[in-house]
Image (cartoon, rainbow, N blue to C red):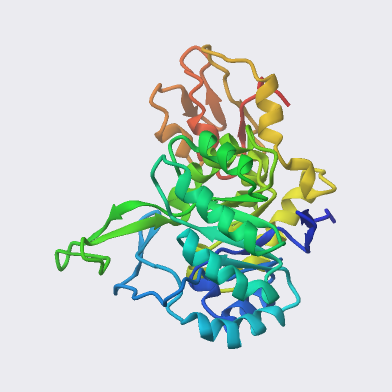
Amino acid sequence: MAKLSVNICGITFPNPVMPAAGPTSKDGAMCQAAARGGAGGIVTKTISVKPAEVPRPCMAEIKGGFLNTELWSELPKEQWLENEYRMVKETGLPVIVSLGYTADQISELAQLVKPYADALELSTHYVGNDISPIVDALKAAKSAVDVPVFMKMSPHPNIQDIAKAVEDAGADGLVMINSFGPCMGIDIETGLPLMGSREGYGWLSGAAVRSLAVRCVYDAAGVVRIPIFGVGGVTSGRDVAELFMAGASAVQVCTAGILKGPGVYGKIVKELEEFLDSHGYADVSEIKGLAHRKMARRAFRTTAVVPVVDNDRCNLCGLCEISCSYDAISRSGQLVIDAGKCFGCGLCVTRCQRKALTLDGGES
């Protein structure tokens, strides 16, 4: 079986899958449930100086994703300090305490949570391009504690510039990405927005943002040396592998934990282990940054690479034929691809549920 434990900034996690700061770690009991469900670490829900007043309704499943108007913890910091963090520590897992939002607030809170934190995660949910609010928050935490401090990043368009600036300012790691938005969904039966915020807006998470998260992790990993926690749309072990290949050192899960319950962490871990074993990897670290190494050798092409068909795997379901805009695929007892018509777009390969199509000619 492949080795799944990871060491990040001197902290050993038995596996690299943990809840993200949010409803799935909203109190000590939920954190204990995450531990029983197979998480390799705990990230507690963000606290601030005052409890949040969350607009309701605040969560909705939408096609392909999830909307929320979740804020920081609705529990007062005193309750966390007196009860919840103690319960979290009882899990025996590494504890990352999430704090927000301004430098002054973080300076006050960091001192208070020191006895419970193996590391801090700072949430600013800042989406501008001026780095100073993020750096100020980071410096406030670093001056108050001697444990690693990880900065949670919004999906900035200039993610490389901000990631490098945060590293240069002293961050021990990055957490990316926060939910994306603002976005909006409307209940067409009532005509009302799904979210209860004043504007009706929410923030997008879940599978809909995974490709955005992968891109942000990939870009940041290309310019920083500090570890990255990949967050955004993780629902399976293969999703974990994808974020690792982009450059992540661990992952956090939120939406899947909400929709599937705390047992989802163990399910994802098992699927990751099965993926690694089936592909001959002895250690999860072997796939970290793999996409960067592959891209360094990849040739840019504008000519078609025709997919190769494994007819032993193909069940002639027809998905690939239906979606082939070039009329290059036919079924006559077996699947046939007309090399003269094939544009090499690759869509059929990604649609095939049985992995019967591969793009031969790409770098191994």
Please indicate whether residue 291 sits to the left or right of residue 74 in the image: right
Front residue of this view, candidates 103 and 22:
103
Q: Residue 243: x percent and y percent? A: 62, 45
Name the quadrant of the N terminus: bottom right
- Which residue is nearer to you in this view: 191 or 355? 191
Q: In the visual, does 138 lie left or right of 11?
A: left
Asked if one can make out residue 232 in the rendered structure from this viewpoint, the answer is no
Q: In which quarter of the image is the C terminus?
A: top right
Measured from the top left, where is residue 238 in percent x and y? 63, 50
Look at 50% across and 39% down and name the residue there: 351
Relative placement, left or right, of 231 versus 199 is right
Decide: is 232 above or below 315: below
Residue at x 53% of width, y 72% of height: 24
* 302, above or below 12, in the image: above
In the image, 308 versus 262, the foreground residue is 262
Q: How far across and down, in percent of the image, does residue 296 sit? A: 68, 22
Q: Is residue 354 left or right of residue 15?
A: left
Question: In this rendering, does residue 203 appear at all?
Answer: yes
| Residue at 83%, 55% in the rendered image | 3
Residue 118: x %, y % from top left: 71, 67
Residue 252 location, quadrant? bottom right
Number of disc labels: 0
Outermost residue to the left: 191
Quadrant of the rendered structure where residue 326 is? top left
Residue drawn at (66%, 41%) of the image: 247
